[in-house]
Amino acid sequence: MEQFIKELNNIKEDKTSGSFQLVLKGLYAFLQFLKRGKDNNDRLDRWNKGVKLFLELRPSMSIFSQSIIELYGRVSPFLLNNEWEKVFLVIEQYYEELNNSIKYIVDGIKSYLDKIEIKKVVTISWSSTVFSILKELRPELVIVSESRPNMEGRITAIRLAESDIKVSFFVDSVLPSLVKGADFVIIGADTLYPDGSIVNKIGSFSLALSAKYFNIPFYVASHTLKLKLKEEKDDNIEEYHSIDEVWNITDKNIKVFNPYFEKVPSELITCYFTEKGYLSKDDLLAISNKRREIMAPLNL
């Protein structure tokens, strides 16, 4: 248990990896945790404790809760019969399925943008999905911002440069003014909502507003596992982190905040590229409704 908790804490404190990468790390750690069980009773106890910890891991990233719920639906018949080798096999297959799904997203946007000469694209922060798309599309220039306070934009810039794609790297505050003349803006998402709004790294909202102002397409690339089944009024989308990353000042009249995420409304989003292809916000609502019906009996 101690090893599993340590691995989950590493995921919780990871401030640079994309949510898709984090959930893959989490699933792998969960599988190894289950395999270390001494007998069927121990494995079932580990399953129950592991699911609870997984659901609580990163509340602002819905992919954690949605992936474990979907996984439960797949393994539940085997759990009931203590068929643990089959449980392990299903988890391994699910891991591979998720790992390969980025290819489907890339293929979808390639088909959508077929025969369009892409000169300039703007993005923010780090998304393994967005990186895979840009690597395949090979625009003439990608504009990337630093994405403070942890500078995830540097990861994007370095990975693109290593792929022989030209990058212009800017401070966050100037990014919205650089949208003019772009072929499109593309970002990832940490959470999708049934109404089409998303949650992503701070700076995404201003980027979307700028794209709207300049009449530039604003695309979101994401797996639909990041789609929440419903939006709750008290939904906590903000993860506040240490002020040491921003400004550690003790003046009683100054209060420093360090949120990592913010919401972007659907009105600012052109469309969504997912493993299911090109989607509109109405498509997201339909998928959410269907999943809610399927998942209701699971009582998770």
Image: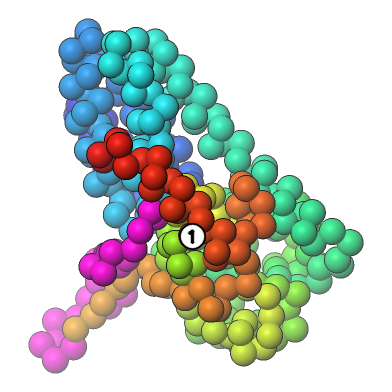
Residue 171: x percent and y percent? 53, 78
For image coordinates 38% across by 48% down, the residue present is 292
In the image, residue 217 lies at what x, y percent?
Answer: 68, 75
- Is residue 156 depicted above or below 80 in this figure? below
Q: Residue at x 28, y 16 (%)?
A: 80
Q: Write the start and end of the magenta stretch as one range.
A: 228-254
Quarter of the image with the N terminus in it: top left
Work out whether residue 185 can be spotted.
Answer: yes
Q: Position of residue 265 (x, y in %)?
A: 47, 75
Is 131 situated above or below 57? below
Q: Quadrant of the C terminus?
A: top left
Where, by quadrant of the figure, is residue 161 drawn? bottom right
Name the chief secondary structure element in magenta. Answer: loop
Its colouring scheme is rainbow
**Number of other residues with Cα within 10 Å of mark 1, as a class: few under 14, some 14 to 19, many 20 or more:** some
* Element under disc 1: helix
Out of 261 and 48, give the one closest to the viewer: 48
What's the residue type where badge 1 is placed? Leu
Per the image, is 247 magenta?
A: yes
Magenta residue check for 84: no
Taking the spot 84% from the left edge, 59% from the top edge, the residue there is 114
| Residue 110 falls in image quadrant | bottom right
Residue 8, quarter of picture: top left
Label 1 sits on residue:
285
Q: 101 left or right of 85?
A: right
